[in-house]
């Protein structure tokens, strides 16, 4: 009864705060207009024909042999990439948490590998694979003398996606393994169980929900991936690339909408299972922290093979990224390795590279603070306030995580180029810079929201209540109390949003107009033409920009971030 009365009192306080009510209304409008509306239009487009509602569009798409192949390819690739990424991620996490490493260098390499996919363009590894193992590859042609090696196709996509996504699994599983109480495993060891038996009978069952969670996250990412299959897929199409080709090649917008709905159903199903079933189980299984320090494995027969295996894999991933840098400096890859800056000269003096970098930087620079602030506001409302639409705001803001970029792109084309807003006050919206900024915000919002929610749950509610008792309104409390306490998450979200925006490709490639030049679109265009020197030059500069942004963020947090004492007091 007291809980119900408290909730009613919170709602009355909320309704009496005009700033908070206005913020909630604007948020609901934004989320409905730019996330739900494009997806709803896709559903309408895929069912509505000139003669009325019908399943004929789906029947036509499902009868296409090319769609059937793309669907099967997508399922097979996503399952293979998900399983392999999870296993490799588990191996890396286990070595870091359980194995006594003689040097900190290997641990440092692990950290570098874990951050590379986050701050790099999504197709760098595909480009590297072509440079190293293609017909003119450094390893295949120059070192091994193989002149007809084909890296394109099914296995090319799987290998690239595993290298791209296993660091995500590694970071997820590392936290789970650290939270296992060592006494459980040591009890089994004291009873005579071997390390393998302890791993299979104690450790593995405890992290099994987390493994399922990591697998589904990777599977969703693999299903939604557009850049890698587009660059290295060859004649193997996936649903993401088929949707793009259905619009740009066949000019079949309704068919693309139907394909997008099918892909969305697949990713959304995986997302619901991952978020509301496995994530909850993983949290319930491993709650809190380990009670004491773990006794690390020092046995050479275990330590050396695992360390060598992980070290070799990590160094190979780093080599893949480094090869792109060298690809921008060699005169003709595979034939003439003379150092030259001609590709950079061509980028800036002949290909409007300056405009591409300016447009991408400015749009991302605008989108990043807006995304981070919006994510913190949503997190604040979800964690600290109780109102009727709280569940709606949380679900829709996180929904973008399950929506593939190509699906969102088709939704914006159908929703704003020819939908309800094709004429009227928002007819200017499609093709404008505002649309690109909105796409960047929507794509980065779930990451910032998750970070903000985690940070806010660690802040005692009494700190904010004391500010309210002194007469501060909700805006003043948020800006002067809450935001300073979570400014590390805010800054981290800001840089993450900037990096994700400037490296985005899957959604923006469908909605960008010739008025704007974006770096990622240029990289995709020149790589598909076979002009790898130009693509490498664009990619290298983009990598430098993203790394500089991350370095500046870390430096800023070091000197101006939330101090440990402040965090402990909170």
Image (spheres, rainbow, N blue to C red):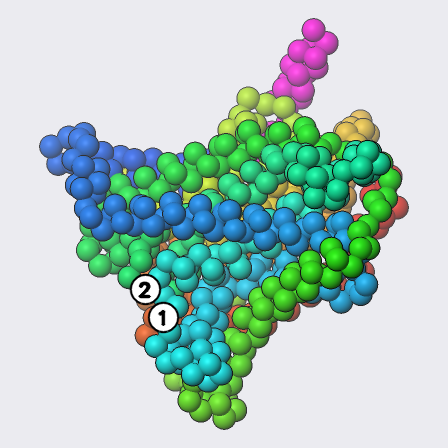
Residue drawn at (53%, 76%), measured in percent from left and top? 323
Of all residues, the one furthest to the front in this rendering is 192
Left or right relative to 114: residue 425: left
* Magenta span includes 27: yes
Left or right relative to 485: residue 416: left
Main secondary structure of the magenta stretch: helix
| x then y, percent, for residue 24 | 55, 32
How many discs mark residues in the rendered view? 2
| x then y, percent, for residue 29 | 46, 35
Residue bearing mark 1: 150
Mark 1, Cα crowd under 10 Å, few <14 / some 14-19 / many 20+, is: few
Residue drawn at (80%, 55%), measured in percent from left and top? 299
Which element is circle 1 on? loop
Q: Nearer the viewer, residue 193 or 200?
A: 193
Instruction: Give the residues in magenta.
Output: 1-28
Question: In the rendered view of the protein, which quadrant contains the C terminus?
Answer: top right
Asked whether the beta carbons under mark 1 and mark 2 sit within 8 Å of each other, the answer is yes
Q: Which mark is residue 263?
A: none
- Which quadrant holds residue 524? bottom left
Which element is circle 2 on? loop
Residue bearing mark 2: 234
Residue drawn at (36%, 66%), measured in percent from left and top? 152
Of all residues, the one furthest to the left in this rendering is 51
- Which quadrant holds residue 451? top right
Tag nearer the camera, 1 or 2:
1
Residue 312 versus residue 350 in the image, above or below: above
* Magenta span includes 75: no
Residue drawn at (70%, 6%), measured in percent from left and top? 1
Reading the chain from its start, which is encountered first: label 1 or label 2? 1
| x then y, percent, for residue 165 | 54, 54
Residue 530 versus residue 442 in the image, above or below: below
| x then y, percent, for residue 322 | 57, 75
């Amino acid at each position: 009864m007291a809980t119900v009365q408290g909730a009613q009192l919170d709602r009355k306080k909320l309704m009496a705060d005009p700033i908070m009510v206005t913020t909630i209304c604007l948020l609901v409008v934004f989320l409905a207009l730019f996330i739900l509306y494009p997806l709803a239009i896709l559903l309408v487009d895929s069912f509505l024909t000139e003669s009325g509602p019908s399943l004929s569009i789906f029947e036509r798409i499902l009868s296409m042999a090319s769609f059937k192949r793309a669907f099967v390819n997508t399922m097979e690739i996503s399952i293979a990439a998900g399983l392999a990424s999870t296993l490799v991620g588990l191996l890396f996490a286990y070595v870091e948490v359980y194995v006594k490493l003689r040097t900190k260098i290997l641990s440092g390499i692990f950290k570098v590998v874990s951050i590379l996919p986050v701050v790099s363009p999504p197709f760098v590894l595909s480009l590297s694979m072509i440079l190293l193992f293609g017909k003119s590859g450094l390893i295949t042609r120059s070192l091994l003398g193989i002149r007809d090696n084909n890296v394109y196709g099914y296995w090319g996509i799987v290998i690239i996606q595993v290298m791209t996504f296993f660091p995500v699994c590694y970071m997820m599983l590392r936290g789970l393994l650290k939270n296992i109480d060592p006494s459980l495993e040591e009890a089994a060891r004291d009873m005579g169980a071997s390390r393998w038996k302890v791993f299979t009978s104690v450790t593995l069952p405890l992290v099994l929900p987390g493994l399922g969670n990591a697998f589904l996250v990777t599977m969703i990412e693999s299903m939604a991936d557009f850049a890698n299959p587009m660059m290295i897929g060859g004649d193997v199409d996936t649903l993401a690339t088929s949707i793009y080709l259905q619009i740009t090649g066949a000019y079949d917008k309704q068919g693309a909408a139907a394909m997008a709905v099918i892909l969305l159903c697949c990713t959304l199903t995986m997302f619901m299972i991952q978020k509301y079933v496995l994530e909850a189980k993983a949290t319930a299984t491993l709650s809190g922290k380990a009670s004491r320090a773990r006794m690390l494995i020092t046995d050479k027969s275990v330590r050396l093979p695992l360390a060598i295996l992980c070290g070799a894999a990590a160094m190979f991933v780093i080599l893949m990224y480094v090869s792109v840098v060298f690809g921008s400096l060699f005169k003709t890859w595979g034939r003439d390795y003379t150092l030259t800056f001609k590709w950079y000269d061509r980028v800036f003096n002949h290909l409007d590279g300056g405009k591409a970098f300016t447009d991408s930087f400015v749009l991302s620079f605008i989108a990043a603070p807006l995304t981070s602030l919006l994510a913190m506001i949503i997190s604040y409302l979800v964690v600290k306030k109780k109102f009727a639409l709280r569940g709606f705001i949380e679900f829709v803001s996180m929904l973008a995580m399950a929506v593939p970029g190509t699906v969102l792109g088709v939704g914006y084309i159908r929703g704003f180029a020819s939908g309800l807003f094709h004429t009227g006050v928002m007819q200017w919206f499609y093709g404008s810079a505002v649309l690109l900024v909105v796409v960047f915000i929507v794509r980065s919002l779930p990451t910032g929201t998750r970070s903000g929610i985690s940070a806010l749950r660690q802040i005692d509610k009494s700190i904010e209540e004391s500010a309210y008792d002194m007469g501060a309104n909700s805006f003043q409390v948020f800006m002067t109390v809450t935001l300073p306490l979570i400014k590390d998450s805010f800054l981290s979200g800001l840089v993450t949003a900037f990096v994700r925006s400037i490296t985005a490709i899957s959604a923006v490639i469908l909605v960008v107009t010739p008025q704007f030049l974006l770096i990622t679109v240029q990289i995709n265009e020149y790589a598909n033409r076979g002009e790898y020197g130009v693509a490498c030059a664009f990619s290298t500069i983009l990598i430098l920009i993203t790394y500089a942004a991350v370095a500046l963020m870390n430096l800023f947090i070091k000197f101006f971030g939330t101090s440990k004492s402040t965090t402990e007091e909170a």
